[in-house]
Image (tube, rainbow, N blue to C red):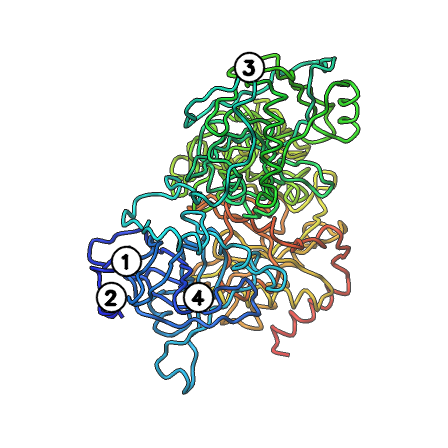
Amino acid sequence: MGLREYQRKRDFQRTPEPAGGLDAAPPVGRYVIQKHDARRLHYDLRLELDGVLLSWALPKGPSLDPKEKRLAVQTEDHPLEYGDFEGVIPEGQYGGGTVMLWDRGTWRCLDDARRSYREGTIKFEIAGQKLRGAWTLVRMTGPRNADGKNWLLIKERDAAARPEQEYSVTDAEPFSVASNRTIREIAQDRQRIWTTDGARGPAEERWRRSPGLHGPADLNIAAAPGARSAPQPATLRAVRPVVAERVPGGDGWLHELKLSGARVLAFLRSDEVRLLDEQGADCTRAWPEVARAVGRLPVQSAILDGLLVVTDARGAPDARALAAAAQSGRQDLVQYHAFDLPFCGGFDLRRVALSERKALLHRLIAAGAAEAKALRYCDHIVGNGDAVFAQAARLGAAGIVSKRAASPYPGKASKAWQVVDCPPAGGPEAETSLAARAPERRIAAVAVEPRATVCGVRLTNPDRILYPEDRVTKRMLAHYYEAVAERMLPHVVKRPLSLFRAPEGLENESFFQKHVGDASIAHLRDSPVREGEGKDPYIAIDDVRGLVTLAQLSVLEIHPWGSREDDVDRPDRLIFDLDPGPEVGWRQVVEAAKAVRDLLADLGLQSFAKTSGGKGIHVVVPITRRGGWDEIKDFCGGVAKVLAAREPKRYVATMAKWARQGRVFVDYLRNVRGATAVAAYSTRARPGAPVSAPVFWDELDAHPIGFTLHSLPRRIANLRRDPWEDFLSCRQSVTKAAQERLARWLRESRTGG
C-alpha cells in the first residue's frame, strides 16, 4: 500500500503526526499497538514490513483468549516514525483524538512474511511489554469482504494465553508503556510527546507522573526533628546491614523480618518515577506495576528504600518466585515493601530518627493505599529481640534485621543496622539484580546473590559472554539453571554425564568432557561408572549446586545417560530423536513424532515430547528398569524400522545422509550403553541460546516451537500444569508381549503382509 494514502489524508502543518520519509531506520521487526480515542475508542495494531508499519484497527482490542476472534480492519500503512507517536491529533484532522502507546516491542513471522501477507494468513510471535507469544492474522473471505480489509486477530494456545473471563488484558493494562499515563491524562495534557529518534531506548525514557493528579498528603514533614530543606539527589547509596551473631537487646531497637527479595530505591519527582537497584542500575521498566504504585503516592517528591518481594505458596517471601515473576511478566505477584524514607517533599530526612522516618513513611503509604496495591509498608516490632528472632525461626524466615530506633539513615555500613540469620531451613537465599532491559523482561532480571554467587556457588568471570549473538553471560546461564532446577534435576542427577563446554564462549574453542580428571571441583563428583576398564570415571552431580557448577564451567549442553548409576545396565527411559533431513518442514517432523507416539501406544507405552533445541523433536518413554541395553536397543530399533518400512518415503531408520533426503531419521541409537541425549531443560550450543523443552503434544501442531534460556522460565511460571508431570510417576515396561507384537509387525512389513 505504501505511504501515499496515509499522507493524502493529513495536513502536516496542523497535526503533530510524522509525515514519513526515506530517513526512517528503526529496528527490524518492530511491533506497536496504539490505543486511539477518536470517534470511537479502538486499538491500532502495527507491524513493520518493508519500511512501513502495516496497520489494522481493532475495535475491541486484542484478547489473550484463543477462543476470541477479534476483528482487525486493515487501514493505510503508516510511517515507521508513527510507532513512537503519543499525543493529541487536532480535531478536524484525519483520526482526530488522543493516541497512546499501549504496547510495543518486536514481532517475528513464523514463515515468509511477504508471502504470508499476500496469502492472507500471518502466523507470528510478539515480544512486547504487554502482549507475548504466538498470534495469527487471517484475512476474511466471502462477498462481505470484497475489498479484503477485514481480518481476524487470534491468540494461539501457548503459555501466554489466558481466558477472557479470567483476564482482560485491555482492562488490566490501561497505562501507556512510554509515559505511564492513562488515555484521559494524555488528552488533558494536550502536549505532543512523540519522538522520531529511533535510537532512544526505553530505559532512557521517564515514567511520567501527571502533575496535579494527586494532592500532597498532609505529613507535616518540616516538623520532624532533623529534617532539612534540600534538593533531592538523583542517586543514593543503598547500604547493607552488618552481619551480627546475636540479636541486640533493649527497647531502643526496631526489629523487621529479613525478606528474600531485591533491594530497590524508588525515586519520585513531580513528573517522573525511577527504580534503581543496589548497583544503581535503572530497573523501572522491569517492574511497571511497582513504578505505577509508587508514582501515585500523594507527594511531589520522595525517595523510598525497600525490597521487591514475591511470596511462595506458603506466603513466605521467595527469591526464586521473584525470579520467576521477572521472567513471566507476572507483575500482579510483585510487591514493594518499603522500610525507609530518606527524602520526602523537598526535605532531607537522613538525620531524622528512624522511628520518625518510618512513621512518616507509614502515613504516606496509608494515604495512597487506594492507588498503591503493589506497595506495602514494612512493619516492625519494638524491643523483645530474642522473642522476635525465635518466632522468625519458627516461621522459617531468613532472619531478622535490627535497627536502632534513633539512628539516622546510614551512609555507610553501621552497627546501627544489623542482620541476624536464622538457621537455614533448606535452600540458599538469593537476592535479585534488576537491571532488566525493556521492552523484554530478560533473564538478566533474575536472582543474583552478593559476590556473584548463585545457590552458594562462586562464579568466576560472571559477566563473560557465552552466547555472543544474544549477549548471554555465565551469570545468566547460572540463573537459568537455578530457575529450572526443580524440573530438570530428576533427569540429570545420579547419572553419568557428558558435557559440552565452551570456556571462552560459543564462538571460541569448545569440546565434550566426560571426566573430572585429577581436579577436585566442589559439587561435582566421580561417578562409579567408567567409560571402560582402566578409564577415568564419568562426571556426576547430585543437586542444584552441581547444576550451577556446570554453568560456572561454561557447560552449554548437558547429556545424561539413559540409566542411573545404581543400576547402570538397566535403562529407565527410551529416547527417539526425530531428526529431519534436508527440505523437511516442521509439519513432517511433528507427524513423525506422533507416528512414533501412536505406535508406542499400540504397544502399551505412554510417551512424552520435548523439543531438541534444534529442528527436531525427542520422544521420550519412561520405563521401569527391567531389560538390559541390548534388549532395549533391539526394541527401539524395531520401532524405527517398522515406521520406515510402512512409510519409506517419509521415514528412514539409517544414519546414512544420502538416505535422509526429504525424510525424517527416526534415530534410535541413543538407546545403547554409553550413548547420551541432551537433557530436558538443557541449553544448546547454538546461536540464540535455545533449550530442549518438554511440551504438550497438542502444542506441536501450532507452529515450530523454539524456547530459549530467556523464554522458558517465563513459560514455566505461566503454565498451570507441567507437560511432563506424569513422567516420573509413570509405571510401565517393555513387556514380552510388546516385543513379540513388534517383531510380528516387522516381519509383516518386510513381506508385505
Q: Eyeballing the image, is 550 above or below 357?
A: below
Q: Residue at x 36, y 70 (%)?
A: 117
The type of residue carrying mark 1 is Glu
Q: Is residue 676 visible?
A: no
Quarter that holds the C terminus: bottom right
Q: Which one is earlier in the sequence, the residue at label 4 or at label 3? A: 4
Cα distance in 3D space between marks 3 and 2: 61 Å
> Where is mark 1, residue-wise?
17
Residue 751: which disc? none
Q: Eyeballing the image, is 673 above or below 303?
A: below
Cα distance in 3D space between marks 2 and 4: 20 Å
The picture places residue 406, in percent across and down from the top left corner, at 62, 15
> Where is mark 3, residue-wise?
413
Residue sitting nearer the eye, 700 or 321 = 321
The picture places residue 550, in percent across and down from the top left corner, at 56, 33
C-beta proximity under 8 Å, tags 2 and 1 = yes
> Where is mark 2, residue-wise?
10
- Assign a secondary structure to mark 1: loop
> Where is mark 4, residue-wise?
42
Quarter that holds the N terminus: bottom left
Q: Which residue is drawn at 54% across and 26% down?
A: 221
Q: Residue at x 74, y 66 (%)?
A: 740
Q: Which one is earlier in the sequence, the residue at label 2 or at label 1? A: 2
